[in-house]
Image: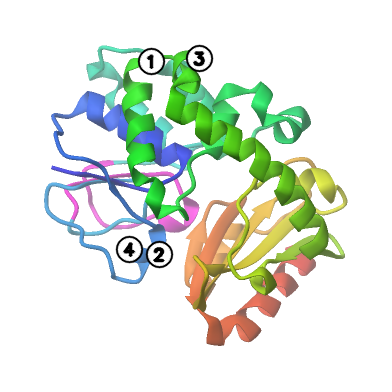
């Protein structure tokens, strides 16, 4: 039996709950949604899939993304909810010895972007928010760190976790990255009516940073589009779209829209991954839909 989940904070907390609820002895298999969507994933009988699209080979599935709904029968739970971890916790809470209410409450807020301006501008003042920013699925070399955070959150509170030597080092890195990321956003973002478009393709490897920061810098924008190469490879382009968490006037269902562009996600946020040859076709269409705002 394996836990198969995504390398973001929601996926980390899914793993925390699943390890506590099930007799699982092997490490998490970290995976990106596009691997499943494009049939590249090795999903096996016995796998518990969480925070990822459904795959018929798994034995249990938990998710909350609008675009991942399925008509197929499955064991587990699906619900349009603030976080996948919350769906997992609701399913297993009756058999858990530990109380993870606070962890799930904070995961719900972070994954649904229910954050205030101060939390976005100064995440170092908010331990859960800062910790969540240290989990970046684009940095595959950090896999041992993701596993460490899972282990820490199973047995320690947030204040002890954040003081762990390795976690503290990652937190310091995030604070510095956010400082530099602000400069990159200002240099590479243009405001197209109410759509903030950040194109990191000219810099090659997209810089890491606070995904909500763009909304504090471009407050007239109701939605953001971030364009980058996939882990520095110019063969693949990733487009991330998100409703502003401060100017909530975007009407587009992002997950539904991106399902037409080889991606998916929530109503308010999502991403798609496609071959670079399709960029000139896909990206203008995405921006036009967002400008139309229907």
Q: Marks 2 and 3, Cα distance to the nearest angstrom?
A: 34 Å
Q: Is residue 22 above or below residue 4?
A: above
Mark 2 and mark 4 in contact (Cβ < 8 Å)?
Answer: yes
- Secondary structure beneath dot 3 equals helix
Judge the density around disc 1: few (<14), some (14-19), many (≥20) Cα neighbours within 10 Å: few
Q: Marks 2 and 1, Cα distance to the nearest angstrom?
A: 32 Å
Q: Give coordinates of residue 119: x percent, y percent.
A: 70, 29
Q: Give coordinates of residue 78: x percent, y percent.
A: 36, 43
Judge the density around disc 3: few (<14), some (14-19), many (≥20) Cα neighbours within 10 Å: few
- Secondary structure beneath dot 4 equals helix
Inspect this view and state whether residue 88 appears: no
**65 within the magenta span:** yes
Q: Which mark is residue 159?
A: 3
**Mark sitting earlier along the chain (2/1):** 2
- Mark 2 sits on what residue? 34
Closer to viewer: mark 2 or mark 1: 1
């Amino acid at each position: 039996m394996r836990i198969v989940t995504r390398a973001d904070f929601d996926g980390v907390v899914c793993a925390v709950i699943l390890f506590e609820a099930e007799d699982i002895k092997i490490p998490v298999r970290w995976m990106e949604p596009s691997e499943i969507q494009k049939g590249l994933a090795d999903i096996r009988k016995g796998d518990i899939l969480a925070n990822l699209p459904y795959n018929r080979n798994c034995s249990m599935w938990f998710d909350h993304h609008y675009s991942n709904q399925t008509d197929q029968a499955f064991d587990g739970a699906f619900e349009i909810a603030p976080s996948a971890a919350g769906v997992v916790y609701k399913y297993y809470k009756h058999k858990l010895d530990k109380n993870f209410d606070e962890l799930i409450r904070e995961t719900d807020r972070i994954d649904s972007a229910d954050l205030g301006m101060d939390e976005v501008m100064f995440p170092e003042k908010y331990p859960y928010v800062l910790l969540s920013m240290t989990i970046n699925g684009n940095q595959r070399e950090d896999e041992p760190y993701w596993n460490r955070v899972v282990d820490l959150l199973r047995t320690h509170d947030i204040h002890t976790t954040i003081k762990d030597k390795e976690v503290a080092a990652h937190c310091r890195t995030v604070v510095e990255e956010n400082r530099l990321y602000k400069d990159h956003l200002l240099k590479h973002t243009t405001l197209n009516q109410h759509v903030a478009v950040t194109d990191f393709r000219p810099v090659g490897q997209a810089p890491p940073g606070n995904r909500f920061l763009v909304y504090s810098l471009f407050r007239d924008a109701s939605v953001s589009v971030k364009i980058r190469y996939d882990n520095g490879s110019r063969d693949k382009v990733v487009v991330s779209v998100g409703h502003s968490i401060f100017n909530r006037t975007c009407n587009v269902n992002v997950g539904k829209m991106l399902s037409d562009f080889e991606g998916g996600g929530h109503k308010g946020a999502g991403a798609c991954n496609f071959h670079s040859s399709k960029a000139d076709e896909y990206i203008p269409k995405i921006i036009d839909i967002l400008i139309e705002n229907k």
